[in-house]
Amino acid sequence: GIQVEQSPPDLILQEGANSTLRCNFSDSVNNLQWFHQNPWGQLINLFYIPSGTKQNGRLSATTVATERYSLLYISSSQTTDSGVYFCAFNTNAGKSTFGDGTTLTVKP
Amino acid sequence: NAGVTQTPKFQVLKTGQSMTLQCAQDMNHEYMSWYRQDPGMGLRLIHYSVGAGITDQGEVPNGYNVSRSTTEDFPLRLLSAAPSQTSVYFCASSYGSFGEQFFGPGTRLTVL
């Protein structure tokens, strides 16, 4: 099956810094999602982004499907951005395959 | 809309006990699925459903049963709980085969 690799596995930032998280997949995918899992374990939808670029406030995402990667940009990070960021691609029949995540810690 | 709801939020079982994790969605989504998340890992698919009356196995189905009698509900049954099933369980739904997935808040299960 298609493999998903996320990097870096861990990231520590000072509040106000910018960061880029990467998601590589081993074959073409039809679509891709980014999630934030907060410290309480809740999975929050960030972006549904099969291709192109989307922005939502301080967060933006870019998927280049032909080159099999997606990037999540976080600008001016805040302590509330801490948590685990997952990318997942959605296969047919409503199933998702997840990467192992990037753990982000933002220090005040 | 409540979205995807799950009950209970927490559960402690003894080895060998059975229980049902409940999942419901009010978005009229055809597709529903169950995942488990073990510490430090991403989510892995247990079972999924493409509509009422139709279910199939995912990556890690052993020890779990599902059924889907209505569009709204997709319960997950643990037949005889084992410590290896200690995990956080998430239910999800989507509209369309490749549609955006929406997740419930999760059930944290501990098997002693």
Image (cartoon, grey):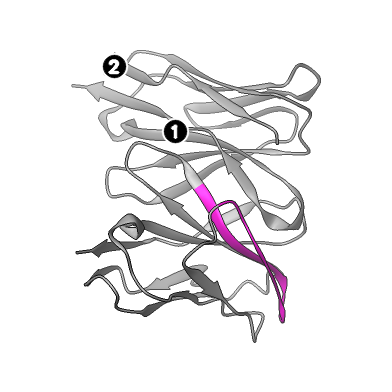
Looking at the rendered structure, whether the residues under marks 2 and 1 are on a common chain is answered as yes
- Check residue B51 for magenta coloring: yes
User: Are the residues flagged by discs 2 and 1 in contact, CB closer than 8 Å?
Assistant: no
From which residue to which does the magenta span run?
B44-59
Q: CA distance from mark 2 to mark 1?
A: 13 Å
Q: Amino acid at mark 1?
A: Tyr
- Front-lying residue, B86 or A86: B86
At mark 2, the secondary structure is strand
Disc 1 chain ID: A
**Most prominent secondary structure in the magenta stretch?**
strand
Rendering coords of residue A11 (x, y %): 34, 17
Question: In which quadrant is the C terminus of chain A drawn?
Answer: top left
Residue placed most toward the observer, B17 or B47: B17
- Image quarter in which the N terminus of chain A is found: top right
Subunit under mark 2 = A
Which label was assigned to residue A85?
A: 1
* Dot placed on the residue nearer the N-terminal end, 2 or 1: 2
| The disc label shown at residue A12, or none | 2
Q: How many C-alpha atoms fall within 10 Å of the one at disc 2: few (<14), some, or many (≥20)?
A: few
Dividing the picture into quadrants, the one containing residue A104 is top left
Residue at 28% from the left image edge and 59% from the top image edge: B83
Say which amino acid is labelled 2.
Ile
Q: Does the magenta portion include A16? A: no
Residue at 72% across / 81% down in the picture? B53
Left/right of residue B39 with respect to residue B4 in the rendered view: left
Residue at image position (46%, 32%) is: A100
Q: Position of residue B93 (x, y in %)?
A: 61, 63
Residue A24, numbered circle:
none
**Image-quadrant location for residue B55:** bottom right
Query: Based on the displayed image, in which of its 4 quarters is residue B109 positioned?
Result: bottom left
B20 vs A3: above or below? below
Q: Look at the picture and state if A68 lies above or below A48.
A: above
